[in-house]
Image (spheres, grey):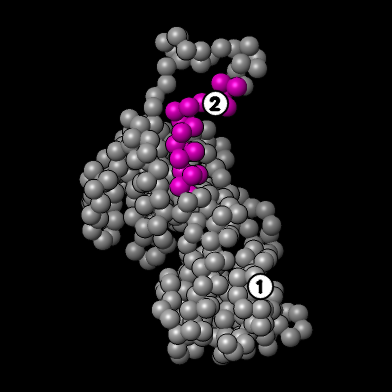
């Protein structure tokens, strides 16, 4: 087997670097590169690497003239300009986060029906708020609910499997036809308002494209059931920011759980509000905010490492690659 150079470019890729040597042939050269490529020799390493693991490729970076496999260590590849890849280079991505995101979604859904934290806080103050036998303590069950899945990729299918274990009914809206016996009703994206009205909770897992940006706008949100919940674990701008804020502030929907946002920290600003100026999502009591954490587990990192290593082996052997973009 010939020796190749593998470059892990940037802080994001570095998350998948530890222990990677154990997954590939030890003769390969692995180099660790900063985001800015401003240390001595880094730009030359980037330009000469045959495999690059990273989340970005733009005109501010050296031309990766030798790269034959560019591997994103995540599902999203929107920051990788494929026009800058040399002829014959292949772009692949990773999933492996669907199990973690599905657990996050189920936890978020369950907390509406099983108020463990509130019951604990009350009992510590000698308030028996949720004591069985009290009519006011009666609570709903997740299994009586209908779950709507906007998008039906890896994430939605993992969520569906867990939702069905709880006895939930499921509806789906997707670009391509859905033929799954576990789905009670399937809609096209052109039928979005009807889909939004079909469920007690809507989970958005669509990728961000020109077609999906803002697809969940004021009309779609207005079609939701008054007490329904919307969860976004896809990309923030798939839901129109202003429309979401207005629907929550005016209590036209039951609430939201938002894990993917509209603004993120940058190298020059480590902390920031996740929303646009003037839209104070943090003030909304019917919103649960989390910092894009739903897929970030030790299992996700391990599965993605294994995918990258397997694709490197396949590329060397001339075998078909997984997750070609």
Q: From this view, report whether residue 241 is shown above or below residue 123.
A: below
In this picture, residue 145 sits left or right of residue 266: left
Can see residue 268? yes
State the residue lying farthest toward the right.
40
Residue 135 location, x and y as percent? 42, 10
Q: Which residue is nearer to you in this view: 272 or 74?
A: 74
Q: What residue lies at 52% left-to-right and 33% top-to-bottom?
A: 285
Residue 121 location, x and y as percent? 62, 21
Residue 71 location, x and y as percent? 52, 74
| Mark 1, residue position | 21
Looking at the rendering, in which quadrant would you find the N terminus? bottom right
Q: Which residue is nearer to you in this view: 74 or 256?
A: 74
Q: What residue lies at 42% left-to-right and 62% top-to-bottom?
A: 208
In this picture, residue 227 sits left or right of residue 7: left
Give the secondary structure at mark 1: helix
Can see residue 193? no
Give the secondary structure at mark 2: helix
| Mark 2, residue position | 116
Q: Which residue is nearer to you in this view: 265 or 77?
A: 77
Q: From this view, report whether residue 311 is shown above or below residue 284.
A: below
In this picture, residue 148 sits left or right of residue 135: left
Q: From this view, report whether residue 162 is shown above or below residue 316.
A: above
Task: Provide the residue span drawn in magenta.
Answer: 101-120
């Amino acid at each position: 087997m010939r020796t190749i150079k593998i470059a892990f470019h940037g802080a994001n890729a570095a998350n998948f670097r530890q222990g990677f040597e154990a997954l590939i042939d030890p003769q390969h050269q692995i180099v660790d590169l900063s985001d800015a490529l401003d240390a001595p020799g880094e730009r030359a390493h980037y330009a000469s690497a045959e495999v690059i693991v990273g989340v970005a490729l733009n005109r501010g970076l050296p031309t990766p003239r030798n790269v034959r496999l560019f591997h994103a260590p995540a599902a999203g590849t929107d920051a990788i300009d494929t026009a800058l890849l040399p002829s014959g280079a292949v772009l692949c991505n990773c999933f492996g986060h669907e199990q973690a995101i599905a657990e996050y979604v189920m936890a978020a859904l369950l907390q509406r029906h099983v108020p463990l934290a509130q019951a604990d806080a009350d009992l510590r103050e000698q308030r028996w708020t949720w004591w069985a036998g009290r009519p006011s303590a009666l609570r709903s069950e997740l299994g009586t609910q209908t779950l709507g899945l906007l998008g039906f990729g890896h994430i939605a299918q993992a969520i569906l499997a867990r939702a069905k274990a709880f006895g939930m009914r499921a509806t789906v809206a997707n670009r391509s036809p859905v033929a799954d016996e576990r789905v009670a009703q399937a809609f096209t994206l052109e039928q979005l308002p009807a889909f939004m009205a079909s469920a007690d909770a809507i989970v958005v897992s669509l990728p961000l494209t020109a077609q999906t940006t803002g697809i969940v706008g004021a009309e779609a949100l207005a079609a939701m059931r008054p007490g329904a919940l919307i969860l976004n674990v896809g990309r923030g701008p798939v839901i129109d920011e202003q429309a979401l804020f207005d629907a929550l502030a005016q209590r036209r929907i039951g609430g939201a759980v938002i894990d993917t946002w509209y603004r993120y920290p940058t190298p020059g600003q480590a902390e920031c509000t996740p929303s646009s100026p003037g839209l104070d999502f943090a003030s909304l009591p019917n919103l649960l905010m989390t910092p894009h954490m739903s897929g970030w587990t030790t299992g996700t990192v391990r599965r993605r490492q294994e995918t990258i290593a397997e694709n490197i082996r396949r590329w060397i052997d001339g075998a078909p690659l997984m997750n070609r973009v």
